[in-house]
Every structure is written in structure tokens, then in C-alpha cells.
Image (cartoon, helix red, strand yellow):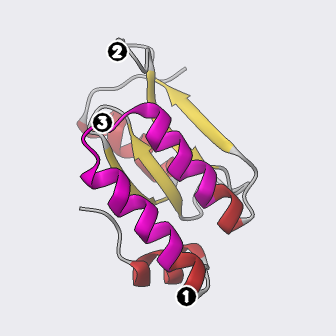
Amino acid sequence: MTPSAKTLSERLGLGEDAAAELKAALVRWDWSEERTRRGADAVLELADRLMDGDGVEAISADNRWREYHMDIVLLYVNTGETYTDTLRYDTERGTFSVGSWGAWVEHAEAHRGMRFS
């Protein structure tokens, strides 16, 4: 389930129009027949622009290997802060969420058996 426009607005600090634009992009991606990394990247790049972020970053896990994403397990808009809410894309689950990338890493280590260097 994609984050609501209200969640995007409140937690990412987006105005109403920007939140609606990002929500529409998330819905289009979610209903696309080909949910590819390229499509996920386009959504994250839009979020980066709307959030005035510092680019899209990737986190790799030492014990993961995927055909298309290779060892990348998370893509997110860099806000400059580890525990500030951002838009995240979990490559293994194929889902977008709002939260900090730091909390995601902690949860993945504790509950999903991922290892990070």
C-alpha cells in the first residue's frame, strides 16, 4: 500500500500540490504492469526534487544478491540525516514507505537477517 498524500505532506514536509503529485506517481507505479527499478528510480527522483533532497542513495547488504538490484536492498531520498523521515524503496519487497533509512537498517538487521558493512 502506498503512503497517502496526507502522510507524504505531513512526514516529508511537502505542500498539498507536491504531495498530490508524488502520490499520483506512486499510484501509477504501483498499478504498472512492469514495476521495474527504472520506474522506482523515477519516483524517487521526483520525490528528491519535490523534497529538495540531496539525491537518491542506495544501501547494500553483504549477504544479499539479486539479479537486477544485485546487492542493493534499499533506495531512499537522502535528507542529510539518518533518522529523518524520507521516501524509501525496499527492493526485496518491491514497496515504497515513509520513514528513516536508519530505522529501516536497524529493523532489517534484527528481523530480516541482513548484514551491512
Q: Nearer the viewer, mark 1 or mark 3?
A: 3
Per the image, is 26 magenta?
Answer: yes
Q: Amino acid at mark 3?
A: Glu
Alpha carbons under labels 3 and 2: distance apart? 17 Å
The disc label shown at residue 34, or none? 3
Residue that carries the numbered disc 2 in the rendered image: 66
Foreground residue among 102 and 18: 18
Q: For the residue carrying disc 1, how many other residues have a C-alpha within 10 Å: few (<14), some (14-19), or many (20+)?
A: few
The one of 70 and 63 positioned closer to us in this rendering: 70
Q: Where on the picture, by quarter, is residue 117?
A: top right
Q: Quadrant of the N terminus?
A: bottom left
How far apart are the alpha carbons under marks 1 and 2? Answer: 37 Å
> CB under 8 Å between callouts 1 and 2?
no
Which callout, 1 or 2, points at the residue further toward the start of the chain? 1
Residue 17: % across, % down:
57, 84
Report the magenta residues as a range: 20-47
Amino acid type for the residue under numbered disc 2: Arg
Q: Would you place residue 87 above or below residue 104 in this image?
A: below
* 57 is higher (above) or lower (below) than 102: above
Q: Which of the two labelled residues, at mark 3 and mark 2, occupies the earlier sequence position?
A: 3
Residue 16, label in figure: 1
- In whole angstroms, how far apart are the C-alphas of marks 1 and 3? 28 Å
Magenta region's main secondary structure? Answer: helix
Which type of secondary structure does the marked residue at label 1 adopt? Answer: helix
Place of residue 114 in the rendered image (x, y in percent of width and height, measured from the top left) = 34, 26
